[in-house]
Image: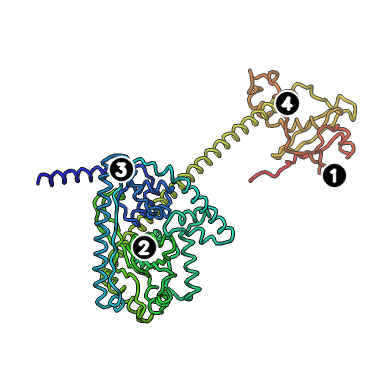
Amino acid sequence: MASNDNSSHVQSQSNANNTNNSNAILDTLSDDQRQCLHEFCTVTNEEDIEAAVRILKSREWNVQFSIQAFYEPGYTDQQLAVSAESSEHDVTQGDSQVRRRRNAAGSQQEQSSGDTADSDSTDSVSRNRPITTTTTTTTTAVVPAFSWFPLFTWPFHLVFRVSTFMIKTVLTLVGLQRIASAGIPGGRNASSSGSGSGADPASRDAAEFRRYFEESFGTDHPPFFTGTYARALEAARRDLKYLLVIVWSKEHDNARLFGQVLTHPDLVSYLSQREFLVWVGDVSCAEAFGVATTLGATRYPFIALGGYKSQLYPATGIRQGGERYKLKIFVRLDGLPNDIPSDTLARSLIRTIRGPVERVNQTLSAARREQQEREAARRIVEQQDRAYQESLARDKERERQMRERDELERTMRESEERRLEEEKRKQGLVKQWKWATFARIQSQEPVDINALPKGAAGKLNLRLEDGTRTLRVFSAEATFQDVFDFVETRDVAAEWEASGGKAPYGEGDLASIEMPEDYEHEYDFALVSQFPRVVFEERAANLKEQLSAKGLWPSAALIVEPLFEPEE
């Protein structure tokens, strides 16, 4: 009794250590590597996470090549031997893993046989088929002792390897790549053939099998899944479909008969439903050989119907607790009798598949509804998130527009302020120029027309823009510039007279006013004579010469006309 308690305690401690090691390993993996680990463990039923990670690392995390390596002869023993060399605890753990694998294989075989027995009561195929059993043999790894034998055998091994390489090279050169790359089914040669060409070997095998089947039996067949077995498992798990696995041999005696069964219209119609996913492989290919080994196939054609069922698991190295899907085999058939017509075999196969499907269809339908609800909830969350993001984007766009509007208003306000300042500065310069010009005119002595000879001075009657008239005597040496300056300073003259002779600059003295620097005054009017109609715009021209040419000297009436229409 005490020994049992001790063993239970040791087993519990070992399980706890395994869980801790698995968690530590998983913490170092990325999401893609965890997905590869999940697919690898699903196909191979490998429970040792450390061993699975070691195999995947040796194949650079290629799931297909890792699965093929797992089924290579002696590969599992090599992995256990490496674990045995690391520590005695690893050896004990490896033995327990072997025992658990043997027990799992035995329980799966019993369950599969029970499911088949239930369907055999109504299936004529199973009544005529002998009952077959699969025996799983496992060996415990032992650390090899030192031996002199390899020192004497390595020359023969070297000769064998060189000869094999030369034979394969010759076969490849003559176009028999299939024979050169096939090797032992499931062996290293088969796995390395696809990697050298850069294509997926499993996908290439699927395409070749589909082409062979259609050339031999026609194109009217169930929809074959053209991807790898691991992808078929993932598709069945994702869509919660029934996975029908068919492994056969083209060299088998009843291969022709089974091809006729697969092309039977009733079977094609039944398997074409959306609930089924059909994966077919030839046992001569590495992947199909590994699948047959995993499922314990003993005769061909081998048929297995499986599906993913939702179950609750404790914390494992693959997924930390919670609900997950695990593949369950509902029906398995090892071989078909040769003395039954293909029509009968097809209908019997339909009945064999339909029975378990009807039993678990309610559970699977509930799982599909649950998946649809989760998908609907996910879509709702996505829609809400999208609506939130759109609302956030609208708010950001509104804020951006407000910032742009505020920036535009600020720019316009600053521009208006600069314009007003510039206008104010120009007005100040214009006012200063007018006062300086008025001071210059006032400093000149007035011209007395009566004291000068006739023609030495002229009198101009000017009508200003506001309609008022003013008289001014100009000498014969004056220019139109003098007339323009006189007209431009009339508003300043009125302001000067109204202020009692005081200027707004300095101490009010006109002599203290200076001309603004770097300023050129622009005149916005012209002097016009009505009879005859003449426009005088050349300010540098001599006043007497221009008016005499028009018969307007020494007396003329001129009108001040603006160059632009006044704004209303």
The label on residue 437 is 4
Disc 3, SS: helix
Earlier along the polypeptide chain: callout 2 or callout 3? 3
Q: Nearer the viewer, mark 2 or mark 3?
A: 3
- Tell which circle, 1 or 3, labels the residue nearer the N-terminal end: 3
Quick one: SS at disc 1?
loop
Q: CA distance from mark 2 to mark 3?
A: 29 Å
Residue identifier under label 1: 532
Q: Position of residue 317 (x, y in %)?
A: 29, 48
**Which is more N-terminal, label 4 or label 2?**
2
Few, some or many C-alpha atoms within 10 Å of disc 1 (few <14, some 14-19, many ≥20)? few
Sequence-first tag of 4 and 1: 4
Q: x, y percentage for residue 445?
A: 79, 22
Instruction: Read off the residue under disc 2.
Output: 292
Determine the image quadrant of residue 133.
bottom left
Q: Which one is in front, 546 or 126? A: 126
Check disc 3 and report the residue beneath it. 84
Labelled disc at residue 180:
none
Residue 240 in which image quadrant: bottom left
Whether residues under marks 4 and 1 lie with C-beta atoms below 8 angstroms apart, the answer is: no
- Of circles 1 and 2, the one toward us is 2
Q: Residues within 10 Å of mark 2 (few under 14, many from 20)?
A: many
